Amino acid sequence: MTDHVVTHATFTLERLYAASPATVFAAWADPEAKARWFAGPDAEHELDFRVGGREVNRGRSDSGAVLTFSSWYRDIVQDERIVYTSTLSEGQDLATVSLTTVQFYPEGGSTRLLLTEQGTFLDGREEPRWREQGTGKWLDALAAELLRSIKQQ
């Protein structure tokens, strides 16, 4: 018999980006921009950015298993807030279910981004600290994407 374990965790990450809230928000909303900073180079990425829309990011773990991160957008307030629910599966096994809120605050000519994730981690398939570290890397990749887009302007 398999031991079934549920771990609940919440984390909050904060970043300051040298771009307006509209620019930072657009990097979440534009499918091409989001794929550059959110999906890995070999990942499949789909984005339907609207309330009720879905985002899917598929890649492979180090062991070769297919990882699927699916999100459904529940609330979007232009340039201010994004709320989505997500699942992460490894093959057919559900690893996590989460609720994420991303808030964009103007701060001078910059944007303070506040991301809060509330997660349910199932049967040890993912650890909360792994998710927090991975999300932090995504937010760092977003900073690089914003720099790239500013240089192109």
Image (cartoon, grey):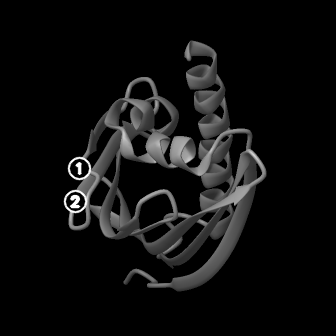
Kindly indicate the quadrant of the structure image that contains residue 14.
Answer: bottom right
Regarding residue 65, the answer to whether it shows in the image is no
Q: Amino acid at mark 1?
A: Asp
Name the residue carrying label 1. Answer: 48
114 left or right of 94 in image: right
Measuring 44% from the left and 24% from the top, which residue is drawn there? 41
Q: CA distance from mark 1 to mark 2?
A: 5 Å
Work out whether 54 lies above or below 33: below
Asked whether 45 or 104 is in front, the reply is 104
Helix or strand or loop: what does disc 2 sit on? loop
Measuring 44% from the left and 84% from the top, which residue is drawn there? 4
Residue 85, horizontal then vertical, whole percent: 37, 71
Helix or strand or loop: what does disc 1 sit on? loop
Asked whether 98 or 65 is in front, the reply is 98
Residue 20, horizontal then vertical, whole percent: 63, 44
- Image quarter where the N terminus lies is bottom left
Q: How many numbered marks appear?
A: 2
Measuring 61% from the left and 32% from the top, which residue is drawn there? 146
Residue 53 is tagged as: 2
Residue 13, horizontal then vertical, whole percent: 71, 63
Contact, CB < 8 Å: mark 1 with mark 2? Answer: yes
Kindly indicate the quadrant of the structure image that contains residue 26.
Answer: top left
Task: Tell which residue pokes out farthest to the front in this image.
Answer: 108
